[in-house]
Image (cartoon, rainbow, N blue to C red):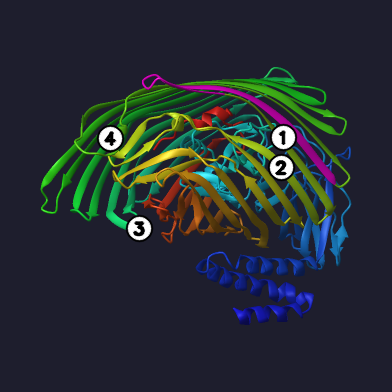
Amino acid sequence: MCANIGLLSAFYRQKNDFVEKTFIRTHKDLLLEYFCNLIMKNFTPFFLVLFLILSSSSLIAQQASISGKVVTISGDPIPFVNIVLYDSEQTIIQGTITEDNGTFVFLSVLEGTYTVKASFVGYETVTSAIFTFSGNKTLPDIQLIEVSESLDEVTVVGKKPTISRKADRLVFNVENTIAAQGTTWDILKRTPGVVIRQGELTVRNTNVTVYLNNRKVELSYEEIQSLLESVGGDLIKSVEVITNPSAKYDAEGGAILNIISSKALYLGYKGSVTARGTYGIFPKHYFGTSHYFKNKKLNVFFNYSFNPLKRTQETNTFINYRNNNSVVAEWDQDIEDKQWRKAHNANLILDYQLNEKQKISFSAVGLYSPDEFNFNRSATQVTSVDSPFSIGTTSRLDGDQKNFAFDMSYSYDLKNGNFKLNTHYTTFSRDRLQNLSSIYTDTQNENFRNVRFTSDAFQDIEIYTGQVDYTSQLGEVTLEAGGKVSIIDSRSVIDFLNIQNDAVNGLDQAQNDDFLYDENVYAGYVTLGKDFDKWSLKGGLRVEQTNSTGTSLVLEEVVALDYLEWFPTAYVKYELSENHSFSLDYGRKLYRPRYQDLNPFAYFLNENNFYQGNSGLLPAFSHQFNFNYSLANAYFFDVYYRDNGENILMLPFQDNVTQVLRTDRQNALDSKSWGFDFTHGRSIAKWWYFYTYMSVFHEEETFLAVESNNVPYTNEVDGFYGSFSNFLTLSADKTYTGEVSFTYVSNFLLGSYIQENTADLRIGLKKTFWDKRASLSVAVNDILGEANALLSSRYLNQDNGYFAVPETQNIQIGFTYNFGNFRLEDNNRELDKKERERLITSD
C-alpha cells in the first residue's frame, strides 16, 4: 500500500493527458485494493479512502467542462431533462439530467467534436449543432418545444442513473436506466444511503417512511415490500431520500423515501403478467398481473398478485445467567422456524378528469392472507452448577390476516396553485392461535417436566383520516398549507387456555386481557419557500394536538395522554458557483409507539423467552441537523447530528434469578447519533455506471437497566457503512444489462444489542427481448454468505445474544411479458395514511 501511495505522488507530477489516460484507470485499481484492506481493518482508514477519491476528483476538475441550460420557448428553465453528449461518431460519451434551474454540466471532457441531445417527455427532442471543443465551453440555451399527446410509441434511449442534491433531499434518478431493472422494491434497496436492518428499510439507523408521488404508503413493512415487489422498476422516474422532511409531511417518523413515478401521457391500454421464483432452502413464488387503461378523462389501474411461499430461518441463541461475576447457568438454544403464507394482494385506482381543473380519484388496496401457519421447533441445552438438562419445544401458530384500505380525493387546479381534499379508511384484523409444548429431560434422558399452553389472540384496528392541502405561488414565494384529522380505534384481546406449568418461568406473565386504544390527532401546517440569486430558502411549521387513551379492561388500568406539540423545519441552500453549493437544514420530529407495542400482552417464543408490550410507552421527540457540501453536483458530503430524545427501544432483559429472558419496549433516557456521509456517482465508461455511499457514524442509547438495579446504562458504537454498486450495459442494443453490488456494515447498534460486521455481494443480469415486450432476469444474493451477523447484549449483569439466518442466500428468477400499448406509463400509486404504518407486521 505504501508503494501505491508513492505511485500516487508520482502521478501528481504528470501532465493532464497522462492523468486522463493512465491515472484514472490505475487509481481505480488502487481504490479496489485499498477497499479490501478497509474491510479487514473496519472503518478506521475511511478518511484515507475519501482523500484518494477527492484527489482524483481534483485532478479531474482540472480538465475542461461543457455546460448549458435548457429552457422553454418562454425562457422558463426545465428540470430533469435528459442530456446526452455524443462525439463525432455519434458514440455516447456522457449522460446527465438538468437541475431545478435547467442547467447541466459535463465534466472531464477531452478535446474533440461533439453534439448535445436534449430530450424530455412531452417535448420535442433537440440536437445541437456540431461544435469543436478545446476548453471550458458554455453552450447557448437549448429551447424545447412542447408537443401534444400521441398514440405513437416512444423509443427510449438507455441512460445511466444519476444522483443530484436539492436543498432538502438527495435524488436518485433511475428512469430508463439499468438501475431500474427489477421491481420498485429492488430500486429502494439500491438507493444511496438505504440500509436493510432486520428486514426493514433504514436511513442513518432510523426506520424510513415510504411515499409514492408525495403520498404516504400506509402499510406495514412486510406489506409495503409485497406491494412494491409487484410494481416494475421501469415505471419509476426517481427516488428522493428526504432525511429531514418539511412541515407538509406528518411530524411522525424519520427519513422519507419518496418514489416518483413517470407520468401517464398516452392514451390506450396496456397490461403485463409476471412470474418470479426465489430459490433458497425452500422455493418461493410470485404471480402477478397489472392492467392500465386511459382515455381523455378516465385512468384505470388494477394489479393483483398471489404470493405462496414457504420460508425458514435458523437461529442460535445464548444466555449466560450470572450471580455477581460468575456464570451459574448457560442456556444454548437452536431454533428452526418455518412459515407458510398464501397472500393475495390487490390494488385498484380510478382517476376521472371532471374538466380541465377538477379531478376525482378513488384508490383501494387489499391484503388477504388466510391460513397462515408457523411451526417453530427448538432444542435448548442448559449447563448449570446444579445439574444440566435439556428442553425440547414445539410451537404452532395458526392465523388469518386482512388489511383493506380505501381512499377518495378531489383536486382543483387554481390559477397559481392547487386545492386538494382527501378522505381515507383502513380496516385491519388479525387472528392467531398458538399451541406450545415443552419437554424437560435430564442427562439420563428421563422426562421430569412438561409445560403446555394455548393462547387465542386477535387484534382489530380501524383508521379514519381527512386531509386538506393548498398550494399557491405568491409571486416568487411558494406557499403550502393544510390540515389533517386522524381517528384510530384499536382493540386487542388475548386469552391463555389450558396452562400446564409447575415451575417458575415466564408463564407467570401469561395474563388474559382486553386492551382498547383510541387516538385522535388534529394537525395543521404552513410552509414558505423562495429562490433568489444564489440562495434557496424554505421554512415551515406544523402543529399537532394528540389525545389518546389506552384501557386494560381486565387489569382496570387507563393510560391517557393529551399533548400539543410544534414542529418547525428550516432549509437554506447557497450556490457559491456552478460546482460548489452548501445547504443546512433543521427539523423537529415525533415517533409514536406502534399499536402492537402498546398492548400489555406477553407473546411467547417459549415459556422461558417472551416479548411483552408496554401500555405506558410515551412518544419520542427528536431534533435533526444536517449540513451538506456538493462538489460539481457529483460529490456530496454530509455532516449530521440527531438528538432522538426518549427514543423507543426494544430491550432484552435476563432475570438471573428465575432464568427467564423478557424483551420489552422502553423509552430511552437519552439517544444521540452523528456521522459523516459521502456519496458519489459517475460513468466510468459509456457502458458502466458506478456509485458509492460511505458513512462513518456514532450511535448511543442510554436506558434504564431494570434487571441491573435500575441503573442508567449507555450502549454506544462507532461504525462504518460502505455501499458500492456497478450498473452495466452488456450489449450494444442495451437489451442485456447487469448489476454487481457490494455492501459492508461494521458494528451496528440496536437498542442494547450490538450487531457484528456484515458483508453482502449481489450479482444480477437482465435480458429484454421480443421488441422489449418481455424480460428475463436472474439475480444471486448474498454470494459470500456474510449478510447476517451475531447480535449480542453484554453489559453489567446481562450476557445474551442471537444469530438469526434467514434465507438471504438465494437465486431469483423472474419473467415479465407486456401486452397492449406496453410503453404507456400508468397511474399506479399507493395509499398514503401515516397511521397505517403503526399496524403490526406479519412474522
Q: Is residue 323 left or right of residue 768?
A: left
Q: Which mark is residue 507?
A: 4
Q: Which residue has dot 1 on it?
A: 568
In magenta stretch: residue 552: yes
Nearer to us of marks 2 and 4 is 4
| Label 4 packing within 10 angstroms: few (<14), some (14-19), many (20+) | many
Q: Cβ–Cβ below 8 Å for labels 3 and 1?
A: no
Q: Amino acid type of disc 2? A: Tyr
Q: Which residues are magenta?
A: 535-561
Nearer to us of marks 4 and 1 is 4
The residue tagged with tag 2: helix, strand or loop?
Answer: strand
In magenta stretch: residue 544: yes
Magenta span main SS? strand
Q: Which mark is residue 586?
A: 2
* Separation (CA) of disc 2 from disc 4: 47 Å
Q: Is residue 688 above or below residue 251?
A: below
Asked whether 78 or 472 is in front, the reply is 472
Of the two numbered discs 3 and 2 on the same chain, state the one appearing first in sequence: 3
Of the two numbered discs 2 and 4 on the same chain, state the one appearing first in sequence: 4
